[in-house]
Image: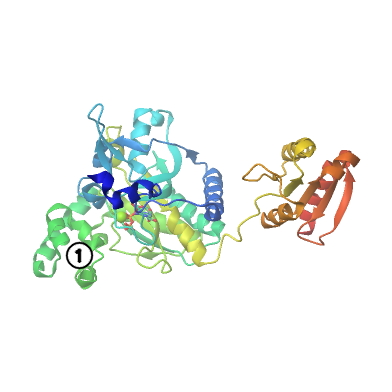
Amino acid sequence: MSETNPSSKKTASSKVLKLAGVKGMNDLLPQDAYRWEFVERTVLSLAKSYGYQNIRTPIVEHTEVFQRGIGEVTDIVEKEMYSFEDRLNGEQLTLRPEGTAAVVRAVIEQNLLYEGPKRLFYIGPMFRHERPQRGRYRQFHQFGVEALGFAGPDVDAEIILMCARLWDDLGLQGLRLELNSLGNEQERKLHRAALVTYFESHQAALDEDSKRRLLTNPLRILDTKNPMMQDLVTAAPKLIDYLGKESLDHFEMVQFLLKANNLPFRINPRLVRGLDYYNFTVFEWVTDQLGSQGTVAGGGRYDPLIERMGGKATPACGWAMGIERVIELMKEQGLGGDEPAVCDVYMVHAGGQTLEPSFVLAEQLRSAGVDVLVHASPDGLVPSFKSQMKKADASGALYAVIIGEDELVQKQAQIKDLRGTGAQSTVSFDMVFDQVIERLVSGSDER
Ligand code: ATP
Ligand code: MG
């Protein structure tokens, strides 16, 4: 019987098991959050400076949104999606693996393009069932822009220049722009035929994935990461040699505008991107500093997509950036600075009656835009000033304001400079607010 089994007794009395997070899905801890906030602030102001507006779609969509919006024969739809059946109504749902398909679904459903073209951006988590490794996670985050309803190459150039400005704003260096044109459907068809003939004559050199793609989506063979196939792929027929006048003109105008803004780039004929609805311009921003996960952002023009998703035929282009990879790169390059202070002012008090003036002052300071932390202890008791001062110091605050029993009687507070001279002065209650503000202002002039 189990009751007499000593090991089961032990289990019953042992601690409750800790729960683990899902593999490949990370917690973002406070010591890293400030870098994320910096990136988030930077992309928000970038979007604003180009006139792009925020759109927020749900995390979950009908699976069909991504099947149609990304294409059946893609890594994402074939093997990376988190899809499930809604137990209550049997709907097939998917955690969004990328932003574009969902934005396009929303824009069509909400008739957003009725008033004319739209410049939009989104930011948020995406989900892909991939093998977790550095720079590759199962929940990751993207910032992306979509320019919907513009056919010209000027907008391709605009969204690329936007990326370049973002790297500048973040202080990132060494990101290279790779560019290609996928032409139109007719040109891709001709190229595809040449590609199939070429790869068929080299069947023996193809890996399993490529043999399968030869039948489904031969262009994607060019995208292979298999080192054994690199020579074969380099010598394959190039799409750019199949482009007609319209496609070439479009591509040249993009390049012209990039050059006019002194933005260097490399034309990479093997750049095909993962999705099969891209046309004309495609691009990626890559770095050597992140190992094999070196693509930080990618995008291009996808004129056929909106119609394919049930909307009125509308040209469009966009890009998406992986925030984790950007943050990794910032760390590599020592960017993002030191962890900021938790607060500007740390309130040290003696509990009881001293809480009242401490709380009132803290609220006044917060109303004036000062970040204030009022000491609190896990046990609800009030520790010695010495131990509170240690906490004040560790918080990174510039000043501690101290209101003890004696101070309360005298209606005074102490202001202690925690970063500079260490000087401490006694100030009456009615002056303490002004004094703290004055010090913060003059201190920030010096800094
Ligand atoms: P990769 O070739 O690295 O798989 P991708 O072509 O699948 O990238 P996109 O769908 O173009 O990537 O997504 C745009 C960006 O999002 C990528 O350049 C990358 O920075 C980021 N990204 C994509 N998948 C992941 C992931 N699993 N984990 C972290 N970031 C990712
Ligand atoms: Mg991928």
Q: Quadrant of residue 193?
A: bottom left
Q: Position of residue 152 (x, y in %)?
A: 39, 46
Q: Amino acid at mark 1?
A: Pro
Can residue 381 be seen here? The reply is yes
Q: Is residue 223 above or below residue 104?
A: below
Residue closest to the eye, 180 or 199:
199
**Residue 221 image offset from top left, x and y in percent:** 20, 61
Quick one: label 1, few (<14), some, or many (20+) residues within 10 Å? many
Ligand 2 located in image quadrant: bottom left
* Residue drawn at the location 49% of the way across and 59% of the way down: 260
- Residue name at image x 51 percent, y 52 percent: 29
Residue 340 located left or right of residue 54: right
- Which quadrant is the N terminus positioned in? top left
Q: Which residue is mark 1?
A: 237
Query: In this orientation, does residue 314 appear?
Result: no
Residue 91 sits above or below residue 216 on the image: above
From the viewer's side, name the closer residue of 271 and 433: 433
Provide residue 254's location: percent of width, then percent of height: 41, 55
Task: Write the residue at 38% across / 33% down.
Answer: 107
